[in-house]
Amino acid sequence: NAVGHVISTVINHDRTTPDGRMTLTVNWEQKVGAVPAMINEEKRGSADSKGDATSQAVFSMVRVWMTEDVSAISFFSFRHARLGSTFFYLQLATFRNLTCCPTFLVGFSGCHLVVSAAVITDKVIVERLGMIWVGHSSTHDEEHTRNVSRFIYGLSLGISDLRDWYRDNLA
């Protein structure tokens, strides 16, 4: 995929599904947990569309962090059981109490790609980091292609920095 990290579809405990989700495996006091690092939502972007992709990404982020994710925990339990590891698996409630739940939000509406960052304190705080038009302007517009590539590469670096932050601050 474009950001250099695996984006998958995970069904939440309440049977809702964001369009895409990227999780990080985090170790804390000899325990392992899967925390959401990026939530992706896609909308057609037309007037008859039922909502903005960026707003939907915020709602999906809150839903993911506030509900227990049974499917991701089961996956990690199965994966580490096959490797013979004896980890204890943490629910997201543990990380909600340890962090401010930093998450990148990606909204794709029509030809616009919007990247935001969000945290949860006593309220949800969202900051738009950038927006770029990803449609074709011409068949020979190399500068536009480079700009889109830089934008997506910046998101990839941000996710890597978030992974390093979890590793350095929860170790």
Image (cartoon, rainbow, N blue to C red):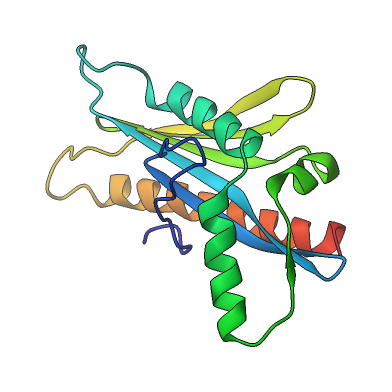
Give residue 11's position: percent from left, percent from top: 43, 46
**Residue at the extreme left:** 139
Give residue 18's position: percent from left, percent from top: 42, 39
Quadrant in the picture for residue 120: top right
Residue 84 as seen in the image, left or right of residue 6? right
Residue 154 seen by the camera: no
Query: In the rendered image, which quarter contains the C terminus?
Result: bottom right
Residue 27 as seen in the image, left or right of residue 37? right
**Residue at the extreme bottom:** 84
Q: Nearer the viewer, residue 52 or 155?
A: 52
Give residue 1's position: percent from left, percent from top: 36, 61
The residue lying at 18 percent from left, 40 percent from top is 136
Residue 7 seen by the camera: yes
Measured along the vertical axis of the image, is residue 59 above or below residue 169?
above
The residue lying at 26 percent from left, 52 percent from top is 142
The residue lying at 80 percent from left, 43 percent from top is 99
| Count of numbered tags | 0
The residue lying at 68 percent from left, 23 percent from top is 124
Residue 1 as seen in the image, left or right of residue 96? left
**Residue at the extreme top:** 47
Give residue 156's position: percent from left, percent from top: 52, 56
